[in-house]
């Protein structure tokens, strides 16, 4: 994408509630707080991933299934032709990445 490796470096952040009593809504709030903190450091969140926990999946839906990817974005023509491509995004076009084992199990 770019020769500027600092601009497009991946910097993972791991977040998880510990008590196991969080609802999907509460877990989404934890994740959103993390995203807000990351944004204050001038970094950009592009994707949120999850494991097989149902509340984590509910949090992903709440945060990333808000709207369709804008047709006017430069990446839209490339992604829109991919069969079964999920074009749902959240604020600032953040995407969801559900555990691939879960997805394949459901196919």
Image: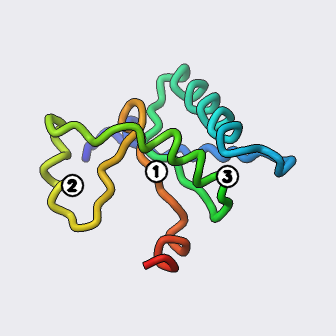
User: Residue 98 placed where, x, y %?
Assistant: 51, 60
Residue depth check, mark 3 versus mark 1: number of the one nearer the observer: 3
Q: Residue 55 — which label?
A: 3
Q: At 40% across and 38% down in the image, what residue appears?
A: 66
The alpha-carbon separation of the residues under discs 3 and 2 comes to 28 Å
Horizontal side of residue 47 vs 69, given as left or right: right
The alpha-carbon separation of the residues under discs 2 and 1 comes to 15 Å
Horizontal side of residue 45 vs 1, given as left or right: right
In this rendering, the answer to whether 57 lies above or below 7 is below
Q: Earlier in the sequence, mark 3 or mark 2?
A: 3
Bin the neighbour count of mark 2 within 10 Å (Cα to Cα): few under 14, some 14-19, many 20 and up. Answer: few
Q: Which element carries disc 1, helix, strand or loop?
A: strand
Dividing the image into 4 quarters, which one contains the C terminus?
bottom left
Q: At 35% across and 47% down in the image, what residue appears?
A: 88
Q: Residue furthest top?
A: 40
Q: Earlier in the sequence, mark 2 or mark 1?
A: 2
Q: Residue 79 — which label?
A: 2
User: Residue 19 placed where, x, y %?
Assistant: 87, 47
User: Residue 55 placed where, x, y %?
Assistant: 67, 52
- Provide the residue designation for mark 1: 96
């Amino acid at each position: 994408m770019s020769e500027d490796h600092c601009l497009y470096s991946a910097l993972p952040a791991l977040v998880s509630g510990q008590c196991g009593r969080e609802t999907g809504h509460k877990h989404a709030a934890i994740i959103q707080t993390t995203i807000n903190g990351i944004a204050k450091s001038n970094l950009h969140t592009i994707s949120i991933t999850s494991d097989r926990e149902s509340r984590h999946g509910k949090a992903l839906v709440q945060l990333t299934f808000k709207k369709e990817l804008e047709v006017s974005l430069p990446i839209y023509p490339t992604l829109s032709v991919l069969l079964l491509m999920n074009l749902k995004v959240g604020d600032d076009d953040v995407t969801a990445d559900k555990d691939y084992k879960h997805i394949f199990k459901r196919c």
